[in-house]
Amino acid sequence: MMLKTVRESLISALKSPARLLSDGDRSVVEAEIHDAGRLTNAYSFMLFSACGIAALGLLQSSAPVIIGAMLISPLMGPIVSMGMALARVDPRRFRSAALTLAVGALLSVLASTIIVWASPLKDVTPEILARTRPTLLDLVVALLSGFVGAYLSINRKGGAIAGVAIATSLMPPLAVVGYGVATAAWDIAGGALLLFLTNVVAILVSVFGVARRYGFRSVERTGAAWETPALVAVMVALCVPLAASLQGIVVETRETNRARGAINQAFAEASPHITELKVQAQGDEPALVQAVVVTRKYIPSAETQVASALGRGTKVEIEQILTAKGAADLSNSALASRPASPPLAPNASPEQRLRAMLTTIGEVQAIERRGPGLVVTFVMNEPGELVDYLALEQAAQRFMPQTPLELIPPLAPLPPVPFAYGSTSLSPDAAASVDTIAWALKRWNAPAAKVEGGASPNPRGRRAADIRIAQARAAAVADRLGAQGIKDIALTTRVPETLSGMRRAT
């Protein structure tokens, strides 16, 4: 008895649901669906506003704001209308709904472009990058969401349609297209446009299938059925780039994990912290590995060790950044407890890459574009000297050679310039100190500099020769500063009257 009941339930569930709707019900449902797909002033206003909200949410990387934009977007209406018109083979209504969708998409891209162009925030955020590489998984999500949306529309259960709007994610990709247009990032715009088209086609296919199951047939048939083969062909064409994108992401993720393990092994005795890791794959193998590693000890053979571990001729570039004191133990520092930075997408902007590199070791207070380059105001978490900030700028510049970089350190005491006893010539260490001073003055936009030359007095008291040594030392420092671009320099000297006076001054 129980088996018979189960069999009857299965048969009932598998039967076509067309019997659940009368011809009158279908007429009402069809009229409501096509009404939601009409081009109206309200539709245009809602779309413009929704895409503006989505663009601001993407620039701020704010998921709640982006979800709000999805909820108020009316883009599902014309797509469902197109699916219903295709199921009924009604070219007139299909063209009308397609025009509504096209106008809506253009308005959305225009709104996003204007807002991004006017906004001071133009960094590529994780929310933007998440919508630039669609895969087969996105197609499956859109298909399932489309089935649910079509079921709710045909059964006139609009209360749950908000969840479908969030799942299908139609509005954010259009906002990302606008971002790409405003910033001339055509790879980002292209990837987001592919995601939008993927969602549209998947929802269209879902609505077509559900509508046919509920008994919506062609108005009149004068030739062979073409709609189903056409939809299948479009789906197959979409699957090719989406499958390639998914395979690329899988390979990059696998090789990134391998590279991370190899780097940690190479720096096993130096308390490493990987602040940025980028892997470019060629086929199924890594071709280039670029990393920035904060370490307490320089490992000269790190690149060789990592390349050997990865094998197959992988090119490895590792920038090693020593801690402020060079040999400080990171295990007790706040840096060691920070989570590793997530891998960035290959199309991440220079601002995004620089921020990801620096935020784990300090606070990025501002990043400003100046022509083709970037100027970053930065403060280390661990107290650092000016030479540490200079080394950090040089490491970042080597890692991002195509983008000129300037790192502005916080105000700090200038390092002393040591001279050997009785010498007025700059030693290599003294010259390096002067170069660090010149770099800091330029980064601070200091309009002038004062150089004080010092010398020790003779044991019997200060002599004219001691003053001349001090003057020569000040002139040597001033000459090197001038060669570095510091022009407005005042020279002074300081020679104590006696050695005891020098000790008291010290």
Image: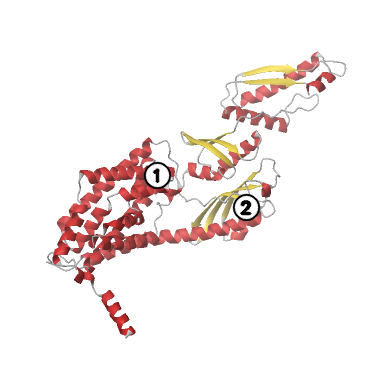
Q: Say the numbered circle drawn on residue 57.
A: 1
Look at 83% across and 17% down and name the residue there: 498
Q: At numbered mark 1, what does the secondary structure look like: helix, strand or loop? A: helix
Residue 294 placement, left or right of 86: right
Q: Amino acid at mark 2?
A: Glu
Residue 316 placement, left or right of 328: left
- Residue 267: % across, % down: 66, 53
In-front residue for pair 336/372: 336
Q: Say the numbered circle drawn on residue 356.
A: none
Examine the image and state in which quarter residue 463 appears: top right
Coloring scheme used: secondary structure
Question: Distance between the Cα atoms at labels 2 and 1?
Answer: 40 Å
Q: Amino acid at mark 1?
A: Gly
Look at 25% across and 49% down and name the residue there: 102
- Residue 475: % across, % down: 69, 20
Q: Visible in this render: residue 172?
A: yes
For disc 1, the neighbor class at 10 Å (few under 14, some 14 to 19, many from 20) is many
- Residue 1: % across, % down: 32, 86
In-front residue for pair 225/14: 14
- Residue 80: % across, % down: 24, 57
User: In the image, is residue 481 above or below residue 205?
Assistant: above
Q: Visible in this render: residue 128?
A: no
Q: Say the numbered circle drawn on residue 303.
A: 2
Residue 485 placement, left or right of 43: right
